[in-house]
Amino acid sequence: MNPPIWKRLVYLFLLMLLAACDGWNDPYPGDANNQSVLYTAFTGRPKHLDPAQAYSENEYEFLAQIYAPPLQYHYLKRPYQLVPLAASAMPVVRFLDKQHHALPDNAATDRIAFSVYEIHLRDDLRYQPHPAFSGVTQDLLGVHSLSDFSHTGTRRVTAADYVYQIKRLAHPQLHVPIAGVMSEYIAGFKDYAATLQQAANQHPDAFLDLNQFDLPGVQVVDEHTYRITINGKYPQFEYWLAMPFFAPMPFEAEKFYAQAGMRERNLSLDWWPVGSGPYYLSENDPNQRMVLTRNPNYMSETYPTQGEPGDAQAGLLADAGKALPLVDQVVFTLEKETIPYWNKFLQGYYDASGISSDSFDQAVQVNVSGEASVTDSMQAQGITLSTAVETSTLYTGFNWLDPVVGGGCDTSPEKQPTIRLGEPTTLAKSLVMAKPSDCGSCRPSAPVLREAYAQTCRDRSERARKLRQAISIAVDFEEFVSIFANGRGIAAQSPIPPGIFGYRDGEAGINPVVYDWVAGKLQRKSIATAKRLLAEAGYPDGVDAQTHQPLVINLDTTATGAGDKSRLDWMRKQFEKINVQLVVRSTDYNRFQDKIRKGDMQMFYYGWNADYPDPENFLFLLSGAQAKVARGGENAANYSDPEFDRLFEQMKNMDNTPQRQKIIDQMLVILHRDSPWLWGYHPKKFVLQHAWLHNVKPNVMANNKLKYWRVDDALRERSRRDWNHPVLWPLWLGAAVLLMFGVWMWRVLKRREQAKL
C-alpha cells in the first residue's frame, strides 16, 4: 500500500534538503571540482570573432587566447616590449630606395622608399582540432555547433597561412577596420583591394578564393618564411604584427565555412574561430557562457624567465620555464549586472574581478599619500590588489571649426577669399581695416584686404585660445577622478599616457598653461587666473563684450543614463566657476557620431585606447591630415597647426631616440599653448584576485594574459566551502513545522474516520 500523500511530501522535502547540502549554491553544478579551470565573466556578446573584423576589447579578450600572431608583448617587462610568439626571432628589416636598391640601416627617412620585413616562423606551430582539417564531408542535418561534427583534424601552420590572412584584410565582403591604414603602408594593397572588389562584382555569389590573386607586398619565401613590403619607413608596423589581424588563417577554414547552410547555423569564423593559439573556443553560448579549452596542439611556449626588479619577490617568476598555458580551461559566464558579479567573486566563484564604483569602498582603502590597498575584510579573505595606469586617454575636445572655441580661420594663401581690385566685397564691408586707405574715397586694395583678413583671423584665434585655456584651468580633473573614478586615474598633461615613449614625469612633463610646480607637486592654477584669461578673450565675467550676451557653450555627449546625470551636473558647475553657461546636448550614439563626422558641435566627450605603445598612436589624433571633417580621420577636434603637423611628420617614423624626444617636447609645447582638448585623465586599471590565483600582473597591452595565470584548485575548493556554508536551520525549522502539520492532519483525519464508525 502506498504511503499517504502527506508522508510522500515529507520524504520529498527531506531528500531535497539533503541534496542541497551538496553543491548548495554552486553556479557551476555541471563542472568537475578540483580541475585546472579559470572562472571569469564577460559583460556582453562579442560581435566579431573573425580576426580580420574584430577590433573591440571584449572581442580581443577571446581572440588573443585563440590566435598566435608573429609577435607579442613581454608579459612582465616594462616599458612594453615586443618579443617573438609564432616568429622564431624578431623580424629582420631591410630598407630599399625607389629603384629597390639596398640602403644602410641608418639611411635618412626621405631616402627610404620601401621597408621589407622578413618573418621566420617556428617549426612547431599547429592548429587546434577542427573539422575543416578532417578531409571528411559531413551532412549538416542535425549540426548546430562544431561539437556536432564527428571528425576533426589538424595540420602545421605555414607562412602561406599568414599571407592568406593579410590578403583577407582587403576582402570586399568583410568590414576590416584597419583596411584604410594598411592600404597606405602595405605595397600594392590598394590595387589588390580594387582587384578583389572587381572579382566580387563579377561573381557576387561565388566563393572568393584569395589564392588566385597575388598581393605584391606580401610574399611566401618558403614554408616557414614570408616577407611584407611596406611603403616608406614605418617602425610602428611591428606593433601591428602582435595583433590578431596578422595571425594565420588556413584557407581550409574559410572554404569550410563558405559551404551552403553553414551561416544559417551560425557556423562561421565570427562564431567559431580557427586558431593556433593556446586555447580554442569549445563552447559558445553568448547569452550564458563561453568556454576556452586548452589547444592540445599548442607549440612549446614557456613562462618567461625574466621580468622587472621585484617580480621574483612578488612570486611572478615561480613558474619560470613551465609549459604554457597553465590552466586547462577558461569558463566565461555572462554577467550583465555588477552586484551579482561582485558577490560571486566574494564567494570565490570568480577568480579575479575589477571593482565597480558601488563596491570600491568595500574593497579598497587609499592612504594619505594616495596609495591604494585592499581593506581589512578583503585582506582577511586573502584577496590582493594589482594596479596599472592604462594606455588610454579620456578627454573633452574643442571643435577647431567652431567660430567661438575653435582655431579662428585659415590664413594660408590657398584658403583666403579671392579679392578683385577695385570691387567692393562683403569681406571689405565686414572687416575693420587694419590700414586706412591713402585716399579717402577710393576702395581698399586687395593686399590691404588680405592683411585685414589675416589680422582678423589672428585676433579670433587668440581670443578662442584664451577661452580654451580658461576652461582648461576651470575644469578640475583631479576632482573628477576623485569623485567619479574613486581615484582610479591621473590627470593628463597631454595626449601621451605613462608607459609610452615621450611621456615625461614630474616638473618636466607638466602642462604650464594649467599647472604650476609648487613644492615638488602639481598645483592647478587659480580660478582668478582663468577669469583673467576669460576677460582677455573678450568675455569679462562670462559676458561677451561685443554683444553683451552671456557666453553659452554646448557639450555633445552620448551620456543619457541615470548615472551620467551627476557627472554632467559636475561639469556644469566647473563652467559656473568662471560664469560660463554649459548646455549639455545628450543624444544616441549614432546621432553623436554623425555630429562628429560633420563637425556639428562645440565640445564633445571622447577617448582613445592605444593600438600600440608608441607616441605616434596618440599624437596622430591631433594631426591635420587626420581631421575628421576634411579627411575622415581620427582627429575629431579637427585641430590644425602647420608647425605641429610638420613636426609630427618628422617624428612619426623615427626610432625612440633623444632626438625623437626633443621633437615630441616641441610638439607638446604647441599643444599646451593651443589647448585643443581638455586633456582629461588616464584611467587606472584595478584588479582584485584571490589567493589561489597566481601570476597576475596588469599588462594593458598584452591581451593574451590568461595563458600565464595559474590556479591552486585545492585552495579554491577549500575556500569556497568555508565561505559558503549553507544556513540550514530555517529549512530544518520548516521541515519540523511541516512534520508537525502532517501529524496534526493525520490525527484529524483518523478521528473523522473513527467517528464514522
Image (cartoon, grey):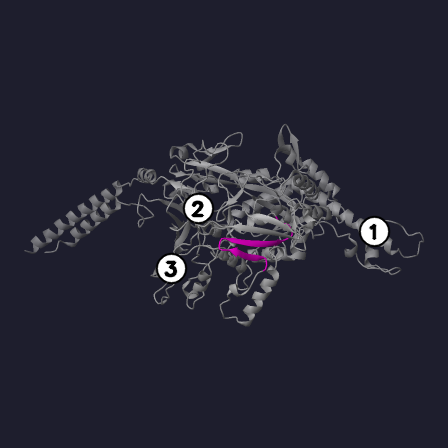
Camera-side residue of 699 and 690: 699
Q: Say which residue label 2 marks.
A: 338
Query: Mark 1 vs mark 3: which is more N-terminal?
Result: 3
Between label 1 and label 3, give the one nearer the viewer.
3
Q: Say which residue label 3 marks.
A: 146
SS at mark 2 in the image = helix
> Is residue 219 one of those drawn in magenta?
yes
Amino acid type for the residue under numbered disc 1: Ala
Residue 195, given in percent of the width and then of the height, sits at 58, 66
Calculate the distance from the C-alpha at mark 1 to the C-alpha at mark 2.
Answer: 60 Å
Q: Quadrant of residue 443?
A: bottom right
Residue 96, given in percent of the width and then of the height, sits at 65, 52
Q: Dot 2 surroundings within 10 Å: few (below 14), some, or many (20 or more)? A: some
Q: Which residues are magenta?
A: 216-234
Calculate the distance from the C-alpha at mark 3 to the C-alpha at mark 2.
Answer: 32 Å
Q: Is 364 displayed left or right of 33 in the figure?
A: right
Q: In this view, which residue lies farthest toward the left?
A: 757
Camera-side residue of 236 and 731: 236
SS at mark 3 in the image = helix
Does 109 appear above or below 259? above
Residue 723, given in percent of the width and then of the height, sits at 33, 38
Amino acid type for the residue under numbered disc 2: Thr
Numbered tag placed on residue 452 in the rendering: 1
Amino acid type for the residue under numbered disc 3: Leu
Q: Are marks 1 and 2 in contact (CB under 8 Å)?
A: no
Numbered tag placed on residue 271 in the rendering: none
Q: Dot 1 surroundings within 10 Å: few (below 14), some, or many (20 or more)? A: some
Query: Mark 3 vs mark 2: which is more N-terminal?
Result: 3
Q: Is 603 displayed left or right of 380 in the figure?
A: right
Between label 3 and label 2, give the one nearer the viewer.
3
> Is residue 322 one of those drawn in magenta?
no
Q: Main secondary structure of the magenta part?
A: strand
